[in-house]
Image: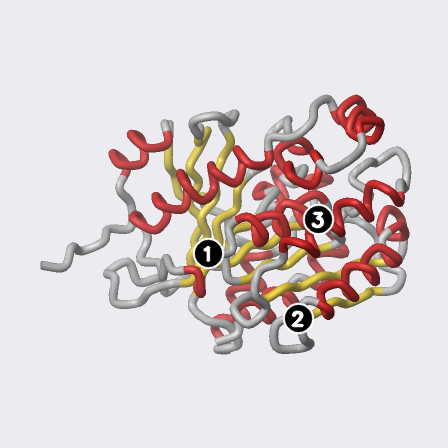
Amino acid sequence: MMKTRMLFLPICLLLCLNLSAQKEIKDINLKGRLFRFEKVKGQWLDPRNVDVWVPNDFDSSGKTRYAVLYMHDGQNLFLPGNSFGGMEWGIDEIMDSLMRNNIIRQTIVVGIWNSPRRFIEYNPEDAFKKLDSLNRNKLATERGGSTLANIYLSFIFDELKPIIDSTFPTKPEMKSTFMMGSSMGGLISLYALCKRSDQLKGVACISTHWPVSLKENNASIAQSYINYFARNLPNPKQHKLYFDHGTSTLDAWYEPYQLYMDSLCIESGYETPKDFMSLSFPGEPHNEIAWRKRAAIPIRFLLQP
């Protein structure tokens, strides 16, 4: 007999993720519904909130199955109160509009809040270990640590994703699972595609922070990371890959590195527009306002029916 899925299974969540509380967030400006799981603690990571957005017409009966878009820096996605600089991406508005107009498939969004150790959780571990000792030490000194990226991905795919898939009526297979992030969140999204390609269909990397450092535009670090990614890209016939960048503030560093990454993607068989897209937005800076303005583009690319 098929087991009916409920919208929430608090006991399961408490046992599996040491979840302390779940509540629906009410806000008159919110499109759709937003549920917050507070202080989610993985086996090896510091606790952080996890937001789950569902559309207004969300069907919890199991008759409708939803794709899942995992996003980093979850506090910046839906409401301004907790977002960096008080500016959020408006992901709820974008998803609501695109879904109501049948431009994208039925999808829920899982926003994973960052922690005080954001840099070392988002710093791709295998790529970092390929650096020479001088550059490894420089990054570790600047950012207060080296990397916990493999543990962070394990938290997402081995702990959080099974709970999302058992709590919500999702399509848990690889072809319906996506990821998106900006800056260091772009790096960890690309790293996830390389490391977990059996569980992840496509990623969107927004203003990908190739130099990793915030103090210097170090070409040797950026090129080393890009070379790692190029060697580990999954089969383009089964995956989708999106990049973009602006040209001002921190984004002014990115264009030569992105062009290099694009060339290696094309050599690997990623072709525009079916499985690959890389866009430049002249004059756009490195902040949530800029990312909000163009977020619908990668979402459409990833989630088109």
Could you tell which of marks 2 and 1 lies nearer the N-terminus? 1
Q: Which one is closest to the eye, mark 2 or mark 3?
A: 3
Residue under the point 89% across and 45% down: 219
The vertical placement of 271 against 254, above or below, is below
Does any portion of residue 78 appear in the rendered image? no
Q: Nearer the viewer, residue 5 or 192?
A: 192
Amino acid at circle 2: Tyr
User: How far across and down, in percent of the image, does residue 131 sit?
Assistant: 77, 36
Could you tell which of marks 2 and 3 lies nearer the N-terminus? 3
Left or right: 44 as drawn, with respect to 193: left
Under circle 3, the secondary element is: helix
Residue under the point 84% across and 36% down: 214
* Mark 2 to mark 1 CA distance (whole Å): 17 Å
- For disc 1, the neighbor class at 10 Å (few under 14, some 14 to 19, many from 20) is some
Q: Which residue is mark 1?
A: 198
Residue under the point 40% across and 43% down: 24
User: How far across and down, in percent of the image, does residue 129 sit?
Assistant: 70, 34
Q: Which residue is mark 2?
A: 270
Amino acid at circle 3: Tyr
Q: Are marks 2 and 1 in contact (CB under 8 Å)?
A: no
Residue under the point 40% across and 46% down: 161
Q: Nearer the viewer, residue 285 or 80?
A: 285
- For disc 2, the neighbor class at 10 Å (few under 14, some 14 to 19, many from 20) is many
Could you tell which of marks 3 and 1 lies nearer the N-terminus? 1
The quarter of the rendered structure image containing the N terminus is bottom left
Q: Which residue is mark 3?
A: 228
Under circle 2, the secondary element is: loop
